Image (cartoon, rainbow, N blue to C red):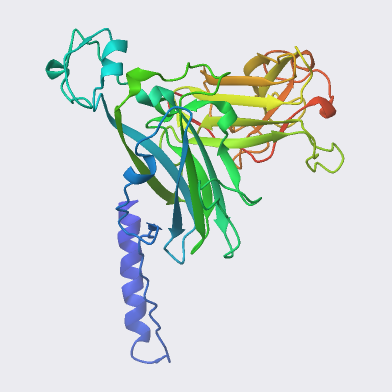
Amino acid sequence: MKKILISSGIIGIVAVAVVSGTIAYFSDTEIGAATLTAGVIDIVVDDQNPWAATYEQELSDMKPCQTRYIEFTVRNLIESNPIKLYKHIDIIEQTDGLITEPECEEGGGAWTGNGLGCTDPQNCCTNYTPRNNLAAYIIYDMQVCKITSSEDCETDEETGKPINDGWIVVIDENQFVRLDNISSSWIYLEDLQPGEQLKVVQSYHLSSWPDAPEPEVTNWAQGDVLNFNIELMGTQIDGEGPEGAMVTVILDNKDPITWETIEDNRSGQLTYNTSGSTFDYSLIAAGLNASTEYSLIYYADSWPGNNPGALIGTHITDGSGAISALGQSVNLNMDLPDQLDDNYPAGAKVWLVPSSNYNGIDSLIVWNPETYLFETKLIKYDDTDF
């Protein structure tokens, strides 16, 4: 082969030598310049870049059963790139802060101080057992709203609570999500097109409502201090997002002919992590059959959903037909969607169906869509151990 290549080269040279002296050609050469540049992602918060806000005034001097609201507006600064926007809270420190006589006594100590209190129990409270887990008693919710006009995204002037219909609930107050449970968890907010703005409102409620899992705070929390950071991240629209990001999708009943959602009291809300070694989720639902077992399933098209499909979890409704399953975790051993799914790579369908309609492993055994809650958008999950 080497000899053949050399010979071909000699033939070519000879041929050029023969014609070069007798024939001339017209020619024109054009050169196009190409430049590759990396894209730019940038967000601005409350017209600050970098963001330098503090919310000490909004969250200071809180008392049991009070709710405080804070808000900020995020704008996609770059005019050419849409983004996915995520947020997380990072708890930095929890301390006793100012120790008062009632706090000292509830902590089993003997008060020896004077005045309003002190910051060192050795100076005012002997045999005191400190307690400073304030984040476990802060109930948290969050809503977002796309700003398209000056009348959008209104909040109450006194409290800051969202008051019009443009708000999207990301975390509902009825989920009783504690602040310490979401610390360092990335939560997906919305996609933002170039130049779009998103208003974000968060509420912090000190002590749980009467039917919440945690008891109300008492004197042990007087003067306690909780320091935390709020971090925002914008990623390219087709990126995976930060590991552990939490996303919320609405589950709703649909007309099986038109597949439009039905406006009634039957619906659910699934909050899940977009990546991790386990699929972590919380599920709340209402308007279902009372005292009935339901299966949360990955339905992988086509029928009967075992392409490959998977059971995510089973949950039993209470007497009112509601489900409140928080802090769930399951090892799926697959990405969502799987490559065999007809919906790959767009996303996966997640449905809530009566367990009597499911084989308990990977597929439906009957079709009763009027009793199901369907996803309102496809989901994606990256199993980092798979």
Residue at 29% of width from left, 53% of height from top?
Answer: 52
Residue under the point 39% across and 77% down: 32
Q: How many marks?
A: 0
Check the image and name the residue furthest to the right: 257
Q: Nearer the viewer, residue 293 or 309?
A: 293
Q: Is residue 114 left or right of residue 296?
A: left
Does 147 appear above or below 303?
A: below
Occupied quadrant, residue 51: bottom left
Q: Position of residue 207 (x, y in %)?
A: 46, 24
Q: Nearer the viewer, residue 94 or 68?
A: 68
Q: Quadrant of residue 339?
A: top right
Q: Position of residue 74 (x, y in %)?
A: 44, 55
Query: Looking at this rendering, what residue extends furthest in the front direction?
Result: 115
Is residue 320 in view from this perspective?
yes
Q: Is residue 169 left or right of residue 267?
A: left
Q: Residue at x 53, y 51 (%)?
A: 191
**Looking at the picture, does residue 37 appear above or below residue 256?**
below
Of 163 and 81, the residue lying toward us:
163
Residue 123 pos. (x, y %): 12, 19
Q: Would residue 367 appear left or right of 42 to someone viewing this image?
A: right
Is 320 on the left-hand or right-hand side of 40? right
Asked whether residue 307 appears in the rendered view, the answer is: no
